[in-house]
Image (cartoon, grey):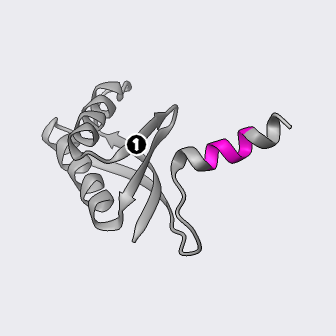
Amino acid sequence: MNVIIDLCVIPMGTTASVSAYIAECQRVLEGTGLSYTMHSYGTNIEGEWDEVMAAVKACHEAVHKMGAPRISSTLKIGTRTDKSQTIQDKIDVVNDLLNS
């Protein structure tokens, strides 16, 4: 099953700035071959369910390996069975409405 998720990883018990941890998670995602888009408060990831969930787990493992003793993540999950839709498709539909 194809899935689009919105993932926000929040390392806890670390410094006030979490950008180094987020950069490491982005490196993990780059290595997965999945399509993803970072935004100001998280990352959209799309692909097959098991591959996307494995990527979420790998992000957690990488951030823990950096020394974060605790991670709180939020995850929004969307699936469709009526048609195939990408992250960009969703953005394009709204932009088309804004430009009409």
- In which quarter of the view is residue 9 placed? top left
5 relative to 81, above or below: above
Which residue corresponds to the image point at 46% horizontal and 55% vertical from the top-left? Answer: 5
* Residue 31 x %, y %: 20, 40
Q: How many numbered discs, if any?
A: 1
| Residue bearing mark 1 | 36
- In which quarter of the view is residue 15 placed? top left
* Residue 84 x %, y %: 52, 63
Closer to the camera, 29 or 95? 95
94 relative to 52, above or below: above
Residue most extreme to the left: 65
* Residue 47 x %, y %: 37, 57
Under circle 1, the secondary element is: strand
Closer to the camera, 2 or 24? 2
Residue most extreme to the right: 100
* Residue 24 x %, y %: 24, 33
Dot 1: within a 10 Å radius of its alpha carbon, few (fewer than 14), some, or many (20 or more) residues? many
Q: Does the segment drawn in magenta span residue 46?
A: no
Q: Is residue 98 left or right of residue 6?
A: right
The quarter of the image holding the N terminus is bottom left
Closer to the camera, 37 or 7? 37
The kind of residue on which mark 1 rests is Tyr
Q: Is residue 32 left or right of residue 41?
A: left
- The secondary structure that dominates the magenta segment is helix
Q: Specify start and end residues of the magenta stretch as a single range.
A: 90-95
